Amino acid sequence: MRPDLLQSLYSSCAVISRAHEGVDSRDCPVRRLCPNVNGAWGEWGPFGPCSATCGHGTRSRIRLCNRPPPQGNGLNCQGIDTQKIPCEGPVPCPQQGQWCPWSNVIQHCSHQCGPVGMGLRTRQCACPKPTYGGENCAVPPEAAAHAEYEETKRNSPEGIPLPPVYAIEAIRLGQGRWEPCNRHPCPYLKFLKTDEEQYLIHDLQVQRFEDAWAWSAGVPAKRYEPVQLRCPPSRLSRVNVFDKPGRFPKAHSYWTRSLPHSANTPSDAPGFPVHNTKTILVEGDRLTIRSLIPEATGVYRFGYEYEPGYFETVCFYTVYIEDSIWNLLYGSTFDLTCNALGLWPVLQKSGLGSWSTYWEVKLDSELEDSESESHWWYTELMKQYSKEELAKLNLSTTGDDRRGEQGTGLTLWDTEYRRIYQATPSLNGRYTCVLFNAVNDTYNRTFITDSFQLSVGQPTSIGVLIRAWCVRNKWNLVALLVIGVLASVISGCCLWRRAQNIARLEVFAKEVRRARRNINLADLDAKVD
């Protein structure tokens, strides 16, 4: 564009206020005063210094939109005005450590198998490691509490795998966790070993009659009193066999009050479990009888079904009512019941010595005599032998000797009932069924399975007997009376009907005789004429 033309575009138009100065005014087009110029980028400047004093940073440079700058309605420059490139500081920065993921492997597991294995799971402060003076990995805020909890368990062990000292230190630093490990079933023997059988025999031998009456200071409870039975967890067979982790994974404990089917039932046959009722409360190895009633008496056993179909008794208790009374009529027949059949699985366990049973009787007529106590029906029960003992006995003795060694051959089923055919007042007294166990030469024990006071009434007069018989058979007498009345009514009706028939026949006979007499008189008159 020519300079003179550009000058004319930028010159001001004349105004009236300057007319006295001799300045001429004229109209000029406004559009010629403001041209449109688009902006354009200038050259890039040099890169500046690195932004980081250590480690990684950036360097930047700029350019301006000034060649030319935008004028009028011209467009701004298009694109970026800043460029950045990475750079390295003069020295590396300190790197803080970060925790790596937890290890997939648990170290130092306490057990190779079973349900209680515990071990240490660790992690490393190496993702990344602390470098160039950087800090170690941050300890989680809950690590100290976890370490204190595990250390508290170490001070009061309860038979569970506890973390060692180095594991607690790793937990405190956030490097470790005490977790389950190797919890898979162990291979195990599905039968009891010899030493385990000895634990069972020992537990059965230390059982005492008084253990059933712990709540009443060793004294048998009265009717309607509470009774609590508990099998101590310290029993050797529980600690070393059935409660031992991994020994019998399928083992479960329960109480039983059921009777074996017969004397041929093996000692390890499971019984029917005792369940909670209004009278009985079962809580693990504790059984509570809220109110002692006849339905709650019997032999209670606590044990373990360690394999399906195999049960071993650990504790047993005989429960009866001390103040029970039997009232009988004079001359009646009754059975003395020992209620001892529930002890058969215990009695037939070999290694418990010999067992005998008898009735301890103290008659009222002899109460003043302190030595009047007598033992009725004393019977030595059939002895039990293990397979090894039985094989040895068969090889070393003759048949007669074997019968002698095995005792009388009678079982609890043979001695459970004793029948009295005629009750008389002379039999009144205290009757107690006793099982005597001679474990060895220096140790024996006694168990009572039932005890009651027998009371037989005095013989009564004929009138009282007749009255009692009528009361006892009143409905039969009512039926007999009804039948007699009906029979009398029917017989009366029959007799009345027969009398009517006889009377009718007599009237007919008289009429016949009268008719015959009239006929005879008529014939006689005819002959006379």
Image (cartoon, rainbow, N blue to C red):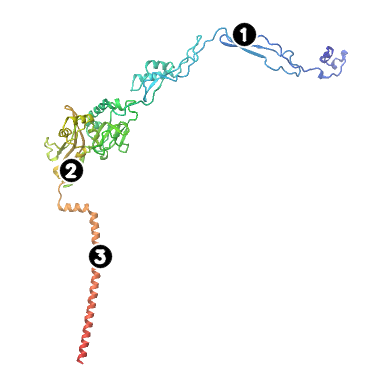
Tell me the number on the disc at residue 490. 3
Q: Secondary structure at mark 2?
A: strand
What is the CA distance from the residue labelled 1 to the residue labelled 2?
A: 119 Å
Residue 386, by quadrant, is: top left
Tell me the number on the disc at residue 496. none
Which three-letter amino acid code belongs to the residue tagged 3?
Ile
The image shows residue 364, relative to residue 152, as above or below, that is: below
What is the CA distance from the residue labelled 1 to the residue labelled 3?
A: 143 Å
Q: Secondary structure at mark 1?
A: loop
Left/right placement of residue 463 relative to residue 38 reads left
Which one is earlier in the sequence, the residue at label 3 or at label 2?
2
Q: Which residue is mark 1?
A: 49
The image shows residue 506, relative to residue 332, as above or below, that is: below
In percent of width and height, residue 23 lies at 87, 14
Image point (16%, 31%), residue name: 397
In percent of width and height, residue 439 lies at 19, 29
- In the rendered view of the protein, which quadrant contains the N terminus? top right
Which three-letter amino acid code belongs to the residue tagged 2?
Arg
Which one is earlier in the sequence, the residue at label 1 or at label 3?
1
Residue 300, by quadrant, is: top left
Q: Are marks 1 and 3 in contact (CB under 8 Å)?
A: no
- In this view, the residue in front, 176 or 68, is 176
Q: Nearer the viewer, mark 3 or mark 2?
A: 2
Image point (23%, 54%), residue name: 474
Q: Which residue is mark 2?
A: 419
Q: Is residue 87 visible?
A: yes
Left/right placement of residue 414 relative to residue 307 reads left
